[in-house]
Amino acid sequence: MFLTLFRKVLGPNQAHVSKSVFGKAMAKIAHLPSLPDTSTRAMALANDPGATLADFSNLIKRDGAIATATLKLANSPMYRVGKPVEELHQAVLRLGLRTCSDLVASIGMRGLFRNAKRETVERCELLWRHSFFTASLATQINVALKLGFCGEEFTAGLLHDLGRFMIALVVPTGADAGDPLDFNEDEQRMAQEEQVLGTNHCALGFRYCQLNSLPPSVALCNLMHHEPGEAVKQGREGYQLVSLIAAADHIANYVHRTHRIKDYDATLNEGLALLACGDRVRWDKLINDMPQLAKAALRTTREVLKTGAI
Ligand SMILES: [Fe+2]
Ligand SMILES: [Fe+2]
């Protein structure tokens, strides 16, 4: 059925040709640049209970771009309290370990596509905004439901669609055929990717995470963010984080598509239902709070982008 659909979209022969071309291109993933060492080390530090702010300052002071961005964010209207800070350590103190780690991960992620061709950069910028908004939403839902994540939800949200970046980078001329960027990440779209690319962005993202030794929780969210029920069924370690990212991603996609949160049908959100665990009171509160949570996440995304730190 899907092959028929794609032949309609691509023409009778193009689906076959594209699949072969794209299949070869997938091998290029192993040669893509990895996230900078500073980014992966910052993520590890943020997850290390023994890490201190001084450890973090020492790590990032060696990277001029990250150090500058940290100072910029600390002095932005979002975080500025009183006098501007001029020392990196003060900036780290002001932002906190988790925000610094998020900042470093975000900068690292942008670095993946900064030097690509213009069309690819534009595509990745759009995906990056989706990723940042998903991460901010995950943080909002985490707080609202008291899930107890301490920032790993932001990192996982930010990196959940790495496979879509991979598609943009390894098959820049035809990425649109597999992923038209209309923010419909439903079953049909996954089938479209599989037909056109011979794989899907979840599997690609997972592979990239493994190749680059990214945290297992990030890898699992890449692999299963479109099937959180399966993660629960398999009893995967980290399934709750997968449900959270799936929930945030579903809402983010709706907002990207419609530019509103009004009329959002939360009953279609599998991740959200898994997080509510059948608790009616919890569910009703979540649905009631959803417009505020989405607006707060959108505000954060816009404000951080406005600082120019990332
Ligand atoms: Fe996705
Ligand atoms: Fe997504």
Image: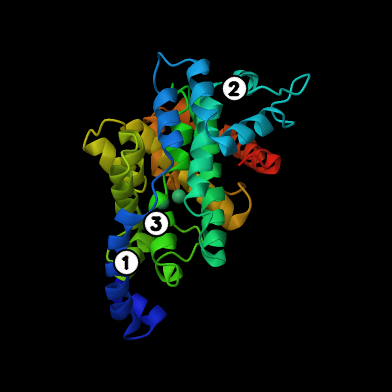
The residue pinned by badge 3 equals: 166
The residue pinned by badge 1 equals: 25
Q: Position of residue 193 (x, y in %)?
A: 35, 64
- Point out the tag, 1 or 2, that comes first from the N-terminus: 1
Q: Nearer the viewer, residue 192 or 97?
A: 97
Q: CA distance from mark 2 to mark 3?
A: 31 Å
Q: Position of residue 196 (x, y in %)?
A: 33, 70
Helix, strand or loop under label 2: helix
Helix, strand or loop under label 1: helix
Q: Amino acid at mark 1?
A: Ala
Residue found at x 36% / y 45% = 225
Say if mark 1 contacts mark 3, CB within 8 Å.
no
Does the closest atom of ligand 1 sit within 8 Å of the Cβ of label 3?
no
Q: CA distance from mark 1 to mark 3?
A: 10 Å
Residue found at x 61% / y 23% = 95
Say if mark 1 contacts mark 2, CB within 8 Å.
no
**In the shown orientation, is residue 106 left or right of residue 203?**
right
Q: Position of residue 133 (x, y in %)?
A: 56, 43
